[in-house]
Image (tube, rainbow, N blue to C red):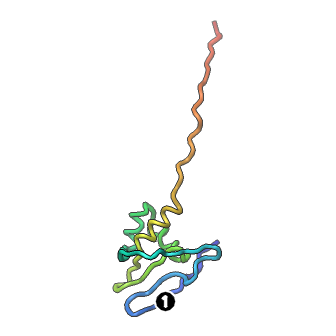
């Protein structure tokens, strides 16, 4: 399914990018935190997630990753949200083939 067009919501100095509602059937709950959120740029988030910047931007466009546009026009995402998305989409190691023994018989004598 192609990403949905993102909606932007403007406040005083920030713009929220993404959807108000999570995708159908998916909920994105944010637990209350004592520590203030740590925001990072899309490039920093991509480096942290070991993914491309376009991967991060796709998740923002789909509404799965919350982002804010702050002064200067840069997009900022919450570090905790990036870590959560990375944990959900962790790449699994491919299964290696089971080692086997090969019997070579030389019966040319």
Residue 93, image x and y in percent? 52, 49
Furthest-bottom residue in view? Answer: 12
Q: Is residue 72 left or right of residue 19?
A: left
Residue under the point 56% across and 75% down: 62
Residue 20 in the figure: left or right of residue 75? right
Residue 69 appears at what percent x and percent y? 41, 83
Q: How many marks?
A: 1
Name which residue lies at 48% across and 73% down.
57
Residue 97: percent from the left, percent from the top?
59, 38
- Give SS at disc 1: strand
Give the image location of residue 20, x and y in percent: 55, 84
Foreground residue among 52 and 84: 84
Assign the N terminus to one quadrant of the image.
bottom right
Q: Residue at x 45, y 79 (%)?
A: 67
- Residue at coordinates 64% horizontally, 76% vertically from top-left? 24
Q: Residues within 10 Å of mark 1 (few under 14, many from 20)?
A: some
Quadrant (top left, top right, bottom left, bottom right) of the C terminus: top right
Residue wearing tag 1 = 9
Q: Is residue 105 left or right of residue 73?
A: right
> Of all residues shown, which one is farthest toward the top?
109
């Amino acid at each position: 399914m192609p990403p949905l067009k993102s909606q932007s919501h403007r406040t005083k100095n920030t713009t929220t990018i993404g959807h108000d509602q999570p995708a159908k059937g998916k909920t994105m709950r944010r637990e209350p935190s004592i520590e203030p959120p740590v925001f990072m740029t899309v490039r920093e988030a991509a480096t942290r997630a070991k993914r491309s910047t376009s991967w991060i931007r796709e998740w923002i466009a789909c509404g799965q990753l919350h982002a804010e546009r702050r002064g200067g026009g840069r997009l900022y995402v919450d570090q905790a949200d990036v870590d959560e998305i990375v944990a959900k989409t962790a790449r699994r190691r491919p299964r290696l083939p089971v080692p086997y023994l090969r019997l070579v018989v030389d019966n040319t004598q």
